[in-house]
Image: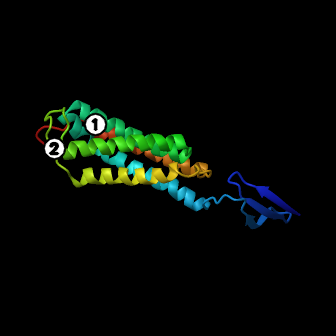
Amino acid sequence: MTALVVHPNGSRRRHIHNGFGAVSTGMIMTGTVAPPRATMRIDLFALATLSFGAAAIHFAVIGEHFAEYALFGVFFSVVGWFEALWALAYVVHPTQRLAGAAFVVNVATVLIWGWAHLVGLPFGPDPGQVEPTTITDLMATLFEIVLVGGLVIVLTRQPPSVVPSAWRAAFLAALIVAVALGTTLALAQPPSMGG
């Protein structure tokens, strides 16, 4: 028996039922070209990885920023948590709204970084003084810039219709939350005096 199945992405598959399950024999496209499932997952995980990488770097410097100026510590905490939780949310449920939120937050973060490192912020312990730039700064900002580029691509095409399997999403969710929580608790402590 042959059946034609129409998928949500607009593609159609002809299935031959052999009594033991369905065997796909071909795909008929209906005007929309959806990326293969593997490509969609790679897109999702690549964007989430970039966001989580930037979050991990922000978590790693929370303590020193709290010691320098409380508002800087709060900023790095909020940005780190947003990036980590966004990565989780986007892998579990990729939407245009989530992509747009990440675009706005990451563009703002890159602009604030540029202001602090090229001009100097007008507040803080040393108003107007340009912040020194380190490899750590550059890597977090690079992750955010590449993420913004990826988000531009996502925001200008149809949202992904393929969600990774539940166990992969659950594992990634548990990993992101565990690492973000552990890193925040470990690094939000003020630096110890005298070693």
Question: Which label belongs to residue 160?
Answer: none
Residue at 39% x, 38% y is 81
Q: Are marks 1 and 2 in contact (CB under 8 Å)?
A: no
Q: Where residue 75 sits in the image (x, y, percent)?
A: 30, 35
Q: Where residue 65 sits in the image (x, y, percent)?
A: 22, 38
Question: Which label belongs to residue 188?
Answer: 1
Q: Nearer the viewer, mark 1 or mark 2?
A: 2
Amino acid of disc 2: Val
Q: Residue furthest bottom?
A: 25
Q: Residue furthest left?
A: 194
Residue at 44% x, 43% y is 102
Residue at 52% x, 48% y is 91
Q: Where residue 152 sits in the image (x, y, percent)?
A: 46, 51
Q: How is the image coloured?
A: rainbow
Judging from the image, what secondary structure is the residue with disc 1 in?
Answer: loop
Figure check: 96 above or below 7: above
Q: CA distance from mark 1 to mark 2?
A: 24 Å
Q: Earlier in the sequence, mark 1 or mark 2?
A: 2
Local crowd at mark 2 within 10 Å, few (<14), some, or many (≥20)? some
State the quadrant of the N terminus. bottom right
State the quadrant of the C terminus. top left
Local crowd at mark 1 within 10 Å, few (<14), some, or many (≥20)? many
Residue 44 in view of the camera = yes
Q: Where residue 181 sits in the image (x, y, percent)?
A: 38, 39
Judging from the image, what secondary structure is the residue with disc 2 in?
Answer: loop
The residue carrying mark 2 is 130
Q: Nearer the viewer, residue 57 or 103?
A: 103
Residue 177 in view of the camera = no
Residue at 26% x, 50% y is 137
Figure check: 75 above or below 172: above
Amino acid of disc 1: Ala
Q: Nearer the viewer, residue 194 or 73?
A: 73
